[in-house]
Amino acid sequence: MDRNSKRNKRWIWIGLILIFGVSCFLVLSNWAAIGTSLANPMRKLLGVERVAQLESMLFNFQDSVKQWQYRLGMVEPESPWDELNNPGVSSLSDPPGLATTRQMPSPTPAVPLPSATRLPSNDLTTLTPAGPLLTPTVTPSPTPAIWNLPNLEPFGTSPGEGVWQPYIYTSAGDVAAVRTFLQPDPERPYALVAVAAFDLTKTRLHYVLGLKEPARPGGPHGWGVIPDEDKQPGKLLAAFNGGFIAEHGYYGAMANGVTSLAGKAGLATLGIYKDGSVRIGEWGVDLLLGEDFDAWRQNALLIIDDGQINPKVYTGTYVEWGANLDGAIVTLRSAIGINEENTVLYYFAGPSLSMPVLADAMARAGVYNGLLMDINPTHAHFTAMLDVDGKLVAESLYEQVMDLWIDRYLGVWDQDFFYITTIE
């Protein structure tokens, strides 16, 4: 073989290695988007602990990539919603009755749904419309109720940080929820936390056990669907994720008299009472078995306990925080909290968050008691429900990281979730 042939073959091999390396880089750096979909079958094959170690390695790698991208100017802080990124686009925060159109989220990427998640073909009201422009249907009342919260002290310098804006309206035009965002991590300025706050005097929280989770094999489980009487345009306002799957702690869960997993003392618990009131606290201390519950859900420890950040946020292991990831691991995390008067319910979600950073954001927002919910992409998910010409259309709270299976809570869903309706 002559010298030129050897040189050409060498360059071919170098090219193949480069292509392989770039492919690996893309897969690893986008593990957040595709890897978590494969986590459950991998746990069955490799075991929970090994998959947890692999996830930790991959999330650390992804975080390093993101930080280098930021240093090189490739990643900038970006508001979770369109109107701050694209000022000409209106949203749910438009004043009720204003005749506007808005750009809907891009179609859901072509990622296969779990078998139990596919929406029935005859339920056309639950599908994201293909058309790009839609007008939410809002009938303003003669004197809409104005509800808002005091603006929050910003962590960073992003325009609009900490400023509450109207987010979700009732069909009468009253403000039911507001939203803002926070920039709590100085080491990762691109990691913004979306915050939605609901007025519990105008809305009601509900909890749904998933078709498969959380439950022990062969044990009681739910149906993973919103009842038809609540899944109505103008009544259903929003839906968001629940907690970890069973094998990540076997945290207790109950809805509509079905206890899929028994409650454990000392754990953070959200309780929904039959009178519609909501409380968050420690099971066995603040909330007790035998109270007049409609539903309750546990998940790890309290992040915020009586207005104070739990010290274990800074020292806890993966057994206490995340069930498969320790609190220092940076990933997409979600949480819920409540104010001291139990009248405001908060939902938090953001990418590239450690437990201490998430806790700081919750404390800054005014949470008195709060707990961690599900983590990792594909699991942390919040959608507002638009009434568009008498049909329900789901819209993500944080479009950049909640773009998979946007309509999941309008069909049958494998995992547990919460939803919010107006009070009739």
Image: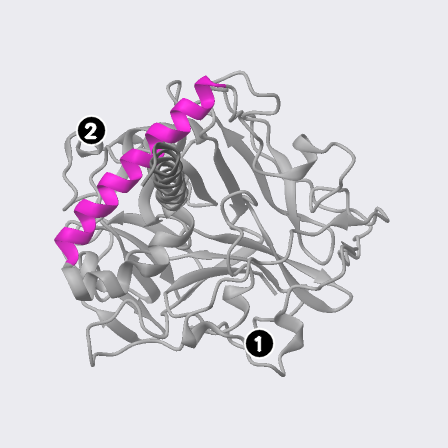
403 left or right, relative to 374: right
Q: Of the residues shown, which amino acid type is indicated by label 1? A: Glu
Helix, strand or loop at label 1? It is loop
Magenta stretch encompasses residue 60: yes
Residue 338, x across and y down, in percent: 40, 43
The residue closer to the viewer here, 340 or 95, is 95
* Mark 2 / mark 1, whichever is N-terminal: 1
Give the amino acid at mark 2. Answer: Tyr
Task: Name the residue beneath numbered marker 2.
Answer: 314
Which numbered marker is on residue 370? Answer: none
Query: Counting other residues with Cα less than 10 Å from the Cα at mark 2, is it few (<14), some (14-19), or many (20 or more)?
Result: some
Is 265 left or right of 277, judged from the image as shown? left
Q: Nearer the viewer, mark 2 or mark 1?
A: 2
Which residues are the magenta region? 48-72
Q: How many marks?
A: 2
Q: In the image, what residue occupies the spot 25% across and 46% down? A: 55
Magenta-colored stretch includes residue 63: yes
Q: Determine whether 47 is above or below 333 in the image.
A: below
Estimate the x, y position of residue 81 in percent, counting from the top left. 61, 39
Residue 330 image-quadrant placement: top left
Q: Is residue 59 left or right of residue 72?
A: left
Which percent across, then down, holds residue 419? 49, 61
What secondary structure do most residues of the magenta stretch adopt?
helix
Q: Quadrant of residue 167?
A: top right
Placement of 86 over or under 134, stated as above or below: above
Residue ID for mark 1: 229
| Residue drawn at (44%, 60%) of the image | 418
Q: Is residue 59 visible?
A: yes
Residue nearest the viewer, comparing 149 with 161: 161
Q: Is residue 305 visible?
A: no
